[in-house]
């Protein structure tokens, strides 16, 4: 979390330095999120839907046994949420792959702070969490990977019933 604050402060300082040609124009910081707020990649359609069911925990690990999600595969009900927790071997993320076109918009809308499309931010600190609602996401299997550890076969899936 400390790293994010440093990056945010550095971004703010850089934006402030670009105030313009001496007319003392106010710097618009509305594009810089406040610490602890959530932002997401803009979607053409879909509105974030809150979790209406149970939460399912997936641990992100990297140790002498290898890099992995525990459990690697979870089956949930529509409306449930998945919470990924960084335990060891950082950095980790969860990046969904091969999402059907008719499910992509809603899944994206339910994913705050995306690093890239359908990809969580990198979790760097022990017990750091990333949460995704599967409310209004159509039933099916959603495969995901850890981008930094794909070569180590760190993969998982969420099956929505």
Image (cartoon, rainbow, N blue to C red):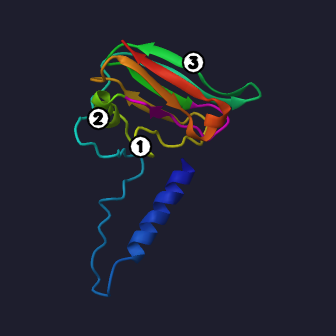
Determine the residue positioned at 29% across, 83% down: 24
Sort mark 3 into few (<14), some (14-19) or many (20+) by Cα contacts within 10 Å.
few
Q: Secondary structure at mark 1?
A: loop
Left/right of residue 60 with respect to residue 83 in the rendered view: right
Which residues are the magenta region?
A: 86-99
Q: State which tag comes first along the sequence, 2 or 1.
A: 2
Q: Is residue 28 magenta?
A: no
Q: Secondary structure at mark 3?
A: loop
Query: Which label sits in the foreground, 3 or 2?
Result: 2
Determine the residue positioned at 58% across, 37% down: 92
Q: CA distance from mark 3 to mark 2?
A: 26 Å
Depth check, front residue: 32 or 138:
138
Which residue is the site of mark 3? 71
Q: State which tag comes first along the sequence, 3 or 2.
A: 3
Q: Secondary structure at mark 2?
A: helix
Which residue is the site of mark 2? 105
């Amino acid at each position: 979390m400390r790293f994010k604050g440093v990056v945010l402060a550095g971004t703010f300082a850089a934006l402030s330095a670009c105030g313009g040609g001496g007319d003392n124009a106010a710097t618009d910081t509305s594009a810089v999120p406040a610490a602890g707020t959530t932002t997401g990649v803009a979607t053409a359609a879909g509105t974030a839907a809150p979790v209406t069911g149970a939460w399912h925990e997936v641990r992100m690990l990297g140790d002498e046994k290898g890099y992995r999600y525990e459990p690697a595969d979870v089956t949930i009900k529509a409306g449930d949420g998945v919470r990924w927790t960084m335990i060891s071997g950082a950095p980790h993320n969860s990046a969904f792959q091969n999402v059907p076109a008719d499910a992509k918009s809603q899944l994206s809308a339910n994913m705050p702070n995306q690093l890239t499309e359908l990809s969580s931010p990198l979790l760097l600190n022990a017990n750091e969490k990333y949460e995704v609602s599967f409310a209004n996401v159509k039933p099916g299997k959603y495969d995901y990977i850890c981008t930094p550890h794909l070569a180590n076969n760190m993969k998982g899936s969420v099956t929505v019933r």
